[in-house]
Image (tube, rainbow, N blue to C red):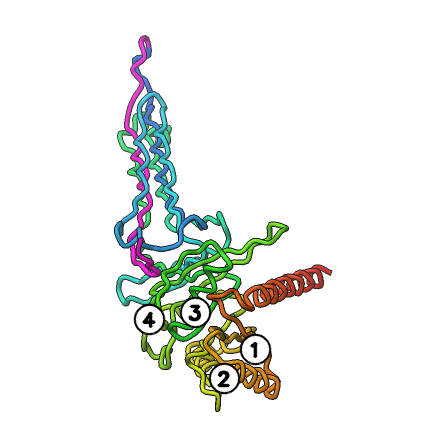
């Protein structure tokens, strides 16, 4: 299935059923009064967040979603049956924008970040009243009833922003896919050429206590990504939801004269796209150290210490340093959880 993170659809709620015009025809009642029942309510159209979906691909295939209409009222004071609601599941992390049909302006109406959260997007129309409601002292036999009220129709743009705890960033061929395949059950495409990863991959790591760490492998960024260069600019928005970043730089791309230039370049791309991204907590990693000589590796470590930078050195291919990095990722994750819990306690106090 292709990874699709944007789609535009049309949604409609159901029309209310028409009220009924009817009169009693019971035996021995020569002048039976009105007996037309009300129409049933039209179905609401509801969006629901679901972690079972990972892409908006289905919404490129089907672009119109309609709830059912309410049934019309009937004689003998019988009301029409209300229509069932139409619930449309969307991937967790979907932003819902209503598009104005005249000027194409957009308004954010929902941000589905919680599992199972539901939001009524279009309310179903009410059923029309039957003629039993229109009897009066001056009109004993009303011969009219209300039509059902129309439902709502909206043009909706959906935008998916992946929700993950950790975002993996790096230049093409930095080894992010290899790393995520080592620590999780994710099976991304891996090959020795740039832009192997064409879509974000999600990996889930679980500890001994059942806690889960969700990691998003963002496709390779290049210089100019914030301006639309390469592939990564399409996926920078997915970084916004992550709690912290792991920035992986390949030893192949290093210059011993300025070994951290790659980190600085991509950080600048993050800043140009969204300044909030540039200040996210970040773990810096140099991968593929198996390609370095012992002398070059020692020099890199010395320069990191001299610059007072915490840098992790690993070879994801050979599992060298992977466990240490993963442990620190868990430590960072748990520390952030504790900070958030402490803040909530202070707010409640």
Residue 63 in the image: above or below residue 175: above
Q: CA distance from mark 4 to mark 3?
A: 11 Å
Q: Mark 3: few, some, or many residues within 10 Å (few <14, many ≥20)?
A: many
Q: Is residue 2 magenta?
A: yes
Pick the residue in front: 6 or 188. Answer: 188
- For this view, does 324 lie left or right of residue 247? right
Question: Is the Cβ of the residue at disc 1 closer than 8 Å to that at disc 2?
Answer: yes
Q: CA distance from mark 1 to mark 2?
A: 10 Å
The numbered disc on residue 260 is: 2
Q: Looking at the image, which residue sits at the far bottom?
A: 257
Q: Mark 4: few, some, or many residues within 10 Å (few <14, many ≥20)?
A: few
Q: CA distance from mark 3 to mark 2?
A: 17 Å
Q: Quadrant of residue 224?
A: bottom left
Residue 117 in the image: above or below residue 169: above
The percent coordinates of residue 268 (x first, y second) are 45, 82
Question: Is the Cβ of the residue at disc 3 closer than 8 Å to that at disc 2?
Answer: no
| Label 2 vs 4, first from the N-terminus | 4
Q: Magenta residues: mostly which secondary structure?
A: loop
Q: Secondary structure at mark 4?
A: loop
Q: CA distance from mark 1 to mark 3?
A: 16 Å
The percent coordinates of residue 48 (x first, y second) are 43, 48
Q: Which residues are magenta?
A: 1-28
Q: Residue at x 42, y 62 (%)?
A: 161
The numbered disc on residue 175 is: 3
Residue placed under numbered mark 1 in the picture: 311
| Label 3 vs 2, first from the N-terminus | 3
Residue placed under numbered mark 4 in the picture: 193
| Label 1 vs 2, first from the N-terminus | 2
Closer to the eye: label 2 or 4: 4
| Label 1 vs 4, first from the N-terminus | 4
């Amino acid at each position: 299935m292709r990874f699709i993170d944007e789609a535009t659809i049309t949604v409609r709620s159901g029309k209310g059923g028409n009220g009924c015009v009817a009169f009693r025809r019971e035996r021995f009642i020569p002048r039976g009064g009105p007996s037309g029942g009300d129409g049933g309510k039209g179905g609401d159209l509801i969006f629901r967040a679901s972690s079972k979906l990972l892409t908006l691909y289905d919404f490129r295939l089907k672009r119109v979603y309609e709830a059912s209409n309410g049934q019309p009222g009937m004689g003998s004071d019988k009301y029409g049956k209300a229509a069932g609601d139409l619930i449309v599941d969307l991937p967790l992390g979907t932003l819902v924008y209503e598009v104005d049909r005249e000027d194409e302006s957009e308004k954010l109406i929902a941000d589905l970040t919680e599992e199972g959260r539901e939001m009524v997007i279009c309310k179903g129309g009410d059923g029309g009243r039957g003629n039993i409601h229109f009897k009066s002292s001056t009109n004993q036999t009303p011969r009219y009833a209300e039509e059902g009220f129309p439902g709502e129709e909206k043009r909706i743009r959906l935008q998916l922003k992946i929700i993950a705890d950790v975002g993996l960033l790096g230049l093409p061929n930095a080894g992010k896919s290899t790393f995520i395949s080592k620590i999780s059950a994710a099976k991304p495409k891996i090959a020795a050429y740039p832009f192997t990863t064409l879509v974000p991959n999600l990996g889930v790591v679980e500890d001994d206590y059942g806690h889960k760490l969700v990691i998003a492998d963002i496709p390779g960024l290049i210089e100019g990504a914030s301006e639309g260069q390469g592939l990564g600019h399409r996926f920078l928005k997915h970084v916004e939801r992550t709690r912290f970043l792991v920035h992986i730089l390949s030893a192949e791309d290093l210059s011993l004269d300025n070994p951290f230039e790659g980190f600085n370049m991509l950080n600048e791309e993050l800043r140009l796209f969204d300044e909030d991204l540039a200040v996210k907590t970040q773990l810096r990693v140099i991968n593929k150290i198996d390609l370095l000589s012992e002398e070059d590796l020692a020099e890199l470590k010395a320069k990191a210490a001299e610059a007072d930078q915490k840098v992790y050195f690993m070879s994801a291919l050979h599992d060298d340093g992977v466990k240490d990095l993963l442990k620190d990722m868990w430590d960072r994750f748990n520390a952030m959880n504790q900070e958030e819990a402490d803040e909530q306690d202070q707010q409640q106090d």
